[in-house]
Image (cartoon, rainbow, N blue to C red):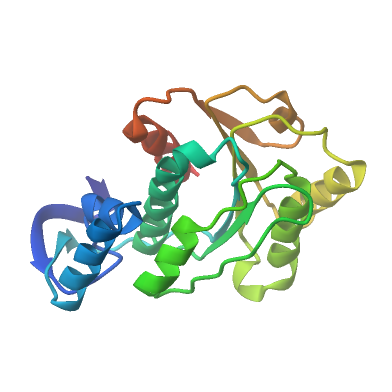
Amino acid sequence: MSSGQHYFTHYERGSLDLERLADQEYLYLASDVSEIRLSFFARAIDGDVLLKHYEGEDELGKGPFVFVYDTSGSIRPYRNILAAIILSLLKAAREENRRFVAIPFSGPDDFQVFDPGPDPTPEQLLELVRFGYWGGTEPYQPLEAALKIINTDESMQKADVLFLTDGEFAPPPEEFLRNLAKARKDIGVSLVSLVLFATNEMCDLFSDRVVSAMRLDDRGSVRMAFEDVFRRW
């Protein structure tokens, strides 16, 4: 693959570098099997992880984004898919020099802001990919939190919102729609939704674009669907 004039040429082994870490190593980091995770950390300490080697010039990345994602109970059986999506987006954001903030959510008042910064530690990554509420689904409070971050954090002024869900929820409140419309007008915010394993008419009411990933049996298909959204955005 290539990004602008920045070309992948081969794999090599070396010290932990999240920007160049091979995809399969991210899956070892996100594994539910403690022995696999510990083996990854041991290799990372020894400087023996698989890395991608790139050649050519780096192109300037696109703008920052806030990833607002569903951790309701129905997502829990597929948390490894969610972990792979999170790590893929974080890796792509680093490769393109894009600021990344994550907001996992579930029911009312259940949301948390994770800001790993430009150089997250393995411990921060593990906390992020394993975190979840596993309750109900109320997306508008975390979406409002995303808009607040974009409006108040200077480093996020040109950020957009990437939203993931797998289920149904209530229609958007009028106040949220007004705040979103103002952010679109004043800052140029866009909101792209990925709906997993279901259809969701509510996303059409507030999203600039809605993408569906319907297949349950292929982790790669879900990741590629979301990465395609990210790359085009």
Q: In this view, does 144 lie to the left or right of 39?
A: right
Who is closer to the viewer here, 155 or 103? 103
Give me the residue at 30% from left, 53% from top. 33
Residue 118: horizontal and vertical position, in percent? 43, 74
Residue 145: horizontal and vertical position, in percent? 74, 60
Who is closer to the viewer here, 38 or 206? 38
Q: Quadrant of the N terminus?
A: top left
Residue 125: horizontal and vertical position, in percent? 41, 65
Give me the residue at 58% from left, 23% from top. 198
Q: Is residue 82 left or right of residue 192?
A: left
Residue 20's quadrant in the figure?
Answer: bottom left
Outermost residue toward the right in this view: 174
Q: Is residue 4 left or right of residue 147?
A: left
Q: From what the image shows, is residue 205 above or below residue 10?
A: above
Q: How many labels does the image show?
A: 0
Give me the residue at 35% from left, 51% from top. 32
Q: From what the image shows, is residue 99 above or below residue 107?
A: below
| Whether residue 62 is visible | no
| Whether residue 193 is visible | yes
Residue 109: horizontal and vertical position, in percent? 78, 56
Who is closer to the viewer here, 155 or 163? 163
Residue 34's quadrant in the figure?
Answer: bottom left
